[in-house]
Amino acid sequence: MIYLMCAILSSGIISILMKLSKSYITNEMALLSANYFICILCSLFFVQDFHFNNSMYLGILNGFFYWISFVLFQRSIQTNGMTLSCTFQKLGILVPTLLSIFIFHEISSCFQIIGICLAIVCIVLLQNMNTKQKVYSISMLVCLLLFNGSADAMSKVFEQVGTNDNLFLVITFLVAFLFCVISILKSKQRIKRNDLLFGILIGIPNYFSARFLLKSLYVLPSLIVYPCYSVFTIVFVGMIGSLCFKEQLNKKYVYILMGFMCALILLNVK
C-alpha cells in the first residue's frame, strides 16, 4: 500500500508544481525539457539490456504522446484550473478502455459501459457550465483526455507486444525530450534558471509516479491500484487547489467532479 500512496502523492505533486511554475517561468518548453532529461537519467539507472526491438518503435510513439499531453496539461491548468485539468488527465483512462474493447477484443463489463456513458454525460454537463466567473475550454480538456489517454493506451499496447519495459521508458522520455528541444530551437526563446529549476523539480515526481505505480501493481491487484490512483489523485489535487490556490468549487462543479470519480471507478471494474 505504501507504493500506491507514494504514486498518488507523486502524481499530485506534479500538478501542484506545474501550477506554481506559472508565476515563475517564461519558457514552458525549457521546463519540459529539463523534466524529461531528469526522467531519462532516472530511467537509465534501471536499464540492463540495450537490445533495440519493438520497444524502440513503441517508445517513439509514446514519447510524442507524453510530450503533447504534458504541453496540453500545463496550458489547461492556466485556462481551466488545476482540479479540472487533473480530472480530465486521469479520465484519459477512457482511451485504453475503448482500445481494449475494439482492438484487443476484450469483453467489457456492464460497469465499464456505464462508466463510459457517465463520463460522456459529465463532459456534456461541463460544457454547459460556463459562468461569468469561469469559462472552461472544453476543446482543450477533451484533447488533454485523448492524448493523455493515448499515452496510457501505449502501456497497454506494450503489455501485449513489448519485451523491455525499462528501455521502453528510456526511449519514451528521450523522444519527448527531443520534441521539447526542437520546439525551443524553433521559438528561439531564452532559457532562464527558473525554467530549468522547475523542470528538474517536476521531473523527479514525474518519473517516480510511474515507478511507484509499477511497484504497487506487484503487490496489489490492479482493480485496487488503478481506481485508487486515479480517484485519490483527483481528490488530493482538488483539496490543494481549493485550500491553497482558492479555486472555486461551486455545487454543480462538485457534482460533476463526483460523477467523474464514479466513472473512473466503474471503468476499472471488470
Image (cartoon, rainbow, N blue to C red):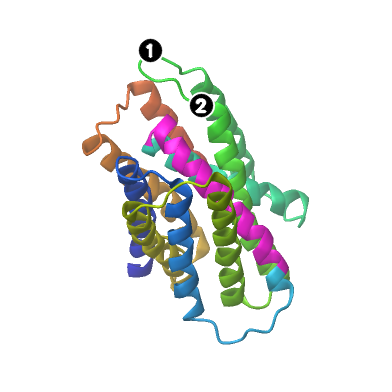
Q: Which mark is residue 132?
A: 1
Q: Which residues are magenta?
A: 57-81
Q: Position of residue 45 (x, y in %)?
A: 46, 81
Q: Position of residue 114 (x, y in %)?
A: 60, 37
In the figure, residue 49 lies in which quadrant? bottom right
The quadrant of the picture occupied by the C terminus is: bottom right
Of the two numbered discs 1 and 2 on the same chain, state the one appearing first in sequence: 1
Badge count: 2
Up/down of 152 relative to 59, above or below? above
Q: Residues within 10 Å of mark 1 (few under 14, many from 20)?
A: few
Q: Position of residue 171 (x, y in %)?
A: 61, 69
Residue 48 in magenta stretch: no
Q: CA distance from mark 1 to mark 2?
A: 14 Å
Q: Amino acid at mark 1?
A: Lys
The quadrant of the picture occupied by the N terminus is: bottom left
Q: Residues within 10 Å of mark 2 (few under 14, many from 20)?
A: some
Residue 270 in view: no
